[in-house]
Image: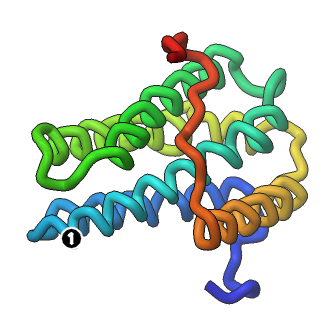
Amino acid sequence: MAADTQPKDGLQLLAQDHRKVEDLFEKFEKASGTSAKEQLVRQICTELKIHAQIEEEIYYPAVRGKVEDEDLDEAYVEHDSAKLLINELEAAAPDESFYDAKVKVLQELIEHHVKEEEKQRDNLFQQTRAAEIDLEGLGAQLAARKAELMAKAESEGLPPAEPSTLQHERA
C-alpha cells in the first residue's frame, strides 16, 4: 500500500486492519488444499499478532482513563484468548485434527472483538472519538510501529504471541 493511501487517523488504521483480517478469514473459508489454507493462516496469524501488539503498546495505553476501563480490560483478555489460538495454529500442520475448528473459533473471537471495538453501540472507537485524543498523532505512531513489526515478520519472523492477562504455566 502506498504511503499516501495510509489512513491518517489511528482508528481508521485499526479498522483497516480489521477489514483485511476479515477478508483473509473469508478466503480461508473458500480455500481448498492444505498449502493454500496454511498460507492464509500464517498471514492471518501475522496480521493479528501485529495488530494486537500495536493496540496493546500504543492504542490501549493512549485511551486508558479516557474510555471505560471495563471495555479496555475485556479487549486485553480477548487478545490473549486469540493469542493462545494463534500460537496453537502456528505450531500446527493444516491437516491436523481441529485445525479448521481452531481457525473458525479464532475468526469468531476476532469478529466479537471487532464488534466491541467498532460496531456495537458505545464501542471503544466511539468512546475514543469522544475523548480528546490526537487521532492523527496516534495514527502516525501506530503506522510506524506496524511497519517496523511487518519488516521484522518478513525478515526474521515474529516470536510466539505473548498473553499479558492470562495465567499460563511455564515449563
Assess disc 1: are there few (<14), some (14-19) or many (≥20) residues with their C-alpha within 10 Å of its C-alpha: few
Report x, y in % for residue 34: 15, 65
Report x, y in % for residue 2: 68, 88
Return the residue at label 1. 35
**With 68 as the anchor, is 106 left or right in this view?**
left
Secondary structure of the residue carrying tag 1 is helix
Q: Residue at 87% of width from left, 44% of height from top? A: 133
**With 93 as the anchor, is 121 left or right in this view?**
right
Q: Who is closer to the viewer here, 156 or 142?
A: 156
Q: Residue at 19% of width from left, 44% of height from top? A: 99
Report x, y in % for residue 83: 47, 35
Counting the numbered discs, the total is 1
Q: Would you identify the image quadrant in which residue 132 lies?
A: top right
Task: Identify the amino acid type marked 1.
Answer: Ser
**With 89 as the anchor, is 80 left or right in this view?**
right
**With 14 as the anchor, is 134 left or right in this view?**
right
Q: Would you identify the image quadrant in which residue 4 lies?
A: bottom right
118 vs 5: above or below: above
